[in-house]
Image (spheres, rainbow, N blue to C red):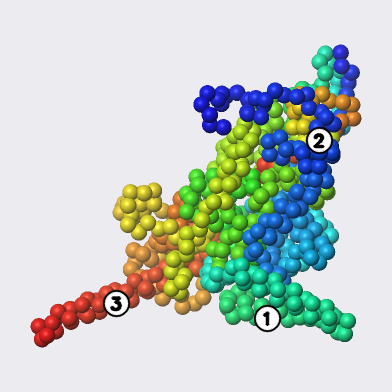
Amino acid sequence: MCQVGEDYGGPGPAELQPKLPWRGCEQKCMKCKEGLPVLIIRAGDAFCKDCFKAYYVHKFRAMLGKNRLVFPGEKVLLAWSGGPSSSSMIWQVQEGLSRESAKRLRFVPGIIYIDEGAVCGQSPEERAKTVVEMKLILQTIAFPYHIVSLEEVFNLPTSVLQPVSQGPRGFENTYKEAVDGFIQQQQQQQQRAPEEGGGEAVLSDEQIQEKLRQLSTQDPVGQEEVAGDSLPRPAQTTALMTLFSSVKTLTAREELLQTLRAHLILHVARVQGYTKVMLGDSCTRLAIKLMTNLALGRGAFLAWDTGFSDDRHGDVVMLRPMRDYTLKEIAFYNRMFGVPSVFTPAIDTKAPEKASIHRLMESFILRLQAQFPSTISTVYRTSEKLVKAPRNGDAAGAATARCLLCMCALDIDSTDSATAFGAQTLERLAQKLSPAPVLPTGAPGRPCCTKGTRLQPGCCRDTRPSSEREEPRASFIEQLCYSCRVNMKDVPFLEPFPPYILMESQCRSQRAWEKQEVQEFLFEESEEEALHPLGFSPQF
Amino acid sequence: MAAPVSVQVEFGGGAELLFDGVKKHQVTLPGQEEPWDIRNLLIWIKKNLLKERPELFIQGDSVRPGILVLINDADWELQGELDYQLQDQDSILFISTLHGG
């Protein structure tokens, strides 16, 4: 690819070879050497239908087997958008669960579908039609499912934004123990089964109940359960559309959508007792995401955003089991084996190529891939090598500061050095100092009484200096990571945000302020203490 | 002089949105001097079927990167891509793998 003298303007390397007059029947499958090839994966590897199926199914199981993160009997939530990758993922899980005992997947799946129609330009009728279509497919799959509309973000509790720390789990020994324990348990159940019918069902019910009880103690605010199938209230649809239309760029809208969607999935997973969530990101999508996130200033979080597992939330771990498949493989598999999927317009449907960073990066990568067939795999392999920085402070029990929106550990440069981050802080300082504040905060005065935020009484005991009180936006921004801060430049108003985000922001700034107050005291005390030894020293 | 060919053209994965939401099109390509290949078919599609934003479907003389082409349910890369000569009753499928179709 990078050899001297290579003509980059000309045809790609694959085409430099003398082209054979290819007819399907003249080539054979590279695996079984017999079958009629139906597709080429990677450069030049032709597969027949049967070999492709075996290859595809194996890859899914290998991905789960290699990583050893999904424990037997664990509840796993499959995030389904209706699109090809996540549909294929559900199909693979179903296939894995229906296998004979030795090779069977042993986790307990459930499906979540989030209806984002309101922000993707669908009318209520179209949305209802899509949901009906989704349900038809879901009923054939026979996993428990949750259909949630994006409007539900307005009912989320603030607990969504609070990470639940949990000790590291998933070491090889623990995994093996868990598998052995599960197999033993199953054998015992099988022995008991003839005597007492339905014993298994009773047990699992009890487990679920217990998990739910645990949850309710962890999550006192989380009483408002996400309503299942009911249609969203029109007022909330309007509120959601107000929020998205206030955002100035498609890039920021896309990021906001991803953030809200992630919160909603997390909440449903917690309330319903799921400890793992499987996302359908494909290799192609992840390569694009990696480059996009770099451009968005999320370089510090690439390992979480694109890796196989994402443990930023602590108790619920996000997994990406489809990350080894290219979109081409997925599209072919779905077509050949009749995997049902539903096309729904996305937020950027029919948008021009340069409408957002996401869109631009997608065409950039795909065009490069058309010329250099190893582009995507090279970028993707890079994402595999990224290592997560250890979470400092977790060991000591103190929670690390997290970004309010993306919930990653804050990448704050406290020294304010000559970095992009420092530049941003300076910019904000300049705005603060300017006589006419340009920030359209919209809610001067008491920030916690902003209309529509529905705060508990008593929250207005705001004793902070007036300059701080007047700038809920400034303190909101301070709770974000670099990328989310940049993004907020295109979000002029805070008011349309769902209440749980605003409330949590309020709490955090209140807490930070109290902490500062306390620390001022501590500092004085320690100063006094520091003086004592000096005072006493002459006596010795 | 090549005889007219009748082929089924199908769009999926959101590509159908550029064709008034219609997925399957049974079309008859008129007889012409040179034989019909995918290259010519794309030009014909652009002129006769495509309803909006041609740049989201065709770029240069090929399809936009990210759109897969299946000829009789097999990868077009196995069949010479743009140079594949259409036979009567062939089925050509275009699947968009692009975000949002």
Q: Is residue A219 above or below residue A303?
A: below
**Residue of label 1:** A210
Q: How many numbered marks are there?
A: 3
Q: Residue A111 vs residue A385: left or right?
A: right
Disc 3 element: helix
Distance between the Cα atoms at labels 3 and 1?
43 Å
Mark earlier in primary sequence (2, 1): 2
Residue A425 drawn at (x, y percent): 36, 53
Q: Residue at x 78, y 56 (%)?
A: A91
**Camera-nearest label, 2 or 1:** 2
**Residue of label 3:** A522
Q: Chain of mark 2?
A: A
- Kindly identify the amino acid type of the residue bearing the numbered disc 1: Glu
Disc 2 element: loop
**Residue of label 2:** A28
**Camera-nearest label, 3 or 1:** 1
Q: Residue at x 27, y 74 (%)?
A: A523
Q: Nearer the viewer, residue A154 or B18?
A: B18
Q: Nearer the viewer, residue A295 or A425?
A: A295
Could you tell me which quadrant the C terminus of chain A lies in? bottom left
Q: Is residue A478 above or below residue A245?
A: below
Q: Residue A422 vs residue A270: left or right?
A: left
Residue B63 drawn at (x, y percent): 70, 31
Residues tagged 2 and 1 counted as in contact (Cβ below 8 A): no
Residue A41 can be seen, yes or no: yes
- Kindly identify the amino acid type of the residue bearing the numbered disc 2: Lys
Q: Residue at x 84, y 39 (%)?
A: A35
Residues tagged 3 and 1 counted as in contact (Cβ below 8 A): no
Residue A165 drawn at (x, y percent): 53, 71
Q: What is the residue that sits farthest to the front in this orientation? A: A33
- Kindly identify the amino acid type of the residue bearing the numbered disc 3: Leu
